[in-house]
Amino acid sequence: METADDAGVYQVSEELAIIQTVDFFTPIVDDPYWFGQIAAASALSDIYAMGGVPKTAMNLVGFPLKQMDISILQKIIQVGLDKLEEADVVLLGGHSVEDSEMKYGLSVTGFIHPQKVVTKKNLKSGDRLVLTKPLGTGVINTAIKRGIASEAITKNISRMMAALNRTAAEVMMQFSVQACTDITGFGLLGHLAEMVEDSGMALRLDSSQIPIFPEAIEYAKMGMMPGGTFKNKEFRLGMIEFSPGVDPLIQDILFDPQTSGGFMICVKREQADALVSKLMDAGVAASAIIGEVISAPAEKIFVE
């Protein structure tokens, strides 16, 4: 709890620990097919981020029986199950309640060796920061809700959010990864702030190297920024220093709350290029080195 890690870890024996997490939310897209996949992928991500292998899951459901047809829920649960099967995870059951608003997610349990747990809190000076998915899903989802986004863009962003972080996790565990987290509701800078807080280290980011969906920039110019962006910015702005040349629009997107975002991996400097190359070869095509860990001043994030 004190380190704000992505999931809880309980050591069973000298060779085995279990990782436990829970995640659910209201629909971010109207299509049950994509919502079920995205929610399942998001729930699994916290296990992957700590280097673990998800093994079992249980459904969490809130459903407005009087307002929505039960076939919608059946579709969501089925595609969620399909995503679990893709991840080789067994669904053991779950719990549902009648609610005024649709909610769906999972509690997930994974396995890991106790000595191989990856946390947020092991930054070392000189390490490089690698991001595995583009930013901007919050902006694009806002455009989708307002009927601005095209069908093609909606499908593309839904496919990206539904993509498992499994491959990224399998690749990163082949390298000397110091720390990792997935980028979700607090945005890139919010999650980096969690990593650098109480670390004695600081971070330097190159904004020109940070992958961002082009559509997110387009929609942000139209005012499609979600409210969570500004809450994230208000909470963490005291830790951030932007160079004068960083576009204010890009500054906001770095606080954009993500849904089922990619990993932020902290890896030894000499292995960073090889990690990115292997991630890209494995299909994690947007992977990029976006910054580095520096020794001072402590607990600051410099964006250039």
Image (spheres, helix red, strand yellow):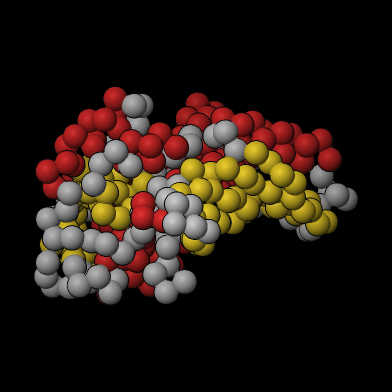
Instruction: Report the residue at 29% width, 71% height from top.
Output: 197
Mark count: 0
Which of the two residues, 129 or 235, is positioned nearer the viewer here? 129
Instruction: Report the residue at 60% width, 38% height from top.
Output: 89
Instruction: Report the residue at 25% width, 70% height from top.
Output: 199
Quarter residue 97 falls in = bottom right
Which of the two residues, 10 or 293, is positioned nearer the viewer here? 10
The answer to whether 190 is drawn above or below residue 279 in the figure is below
The answer to whether 167 is drawn above or below residue 113 in the figure is above
Residue 3 seen anywhere in this rendered image of the structure: yes
Residue 282 % position (x, y): 34, 26
Residue 158 seen anywhere in this rendered image of the structure: no
Which of the two residues, 168 or 88, is positioned nearer the viewer here? 88
Q: Is residue 226 left or right of residue 69?
A: left
Q: Is residue 105 left or right of residue 235?
A: right
Residue 115 % position (x, y): 36, 55
Which of the image's four quarters has the C terminus? bottom left
Instruction: Report the residue at 18% width, 60% height from top.
Output: 124
Quarter residue 285 falls in = top left
Residue sitting farthest toward the right:
66
Residue 141 % position (x, y): 51, 45
Residue 65 % position (x, y): 85, 49
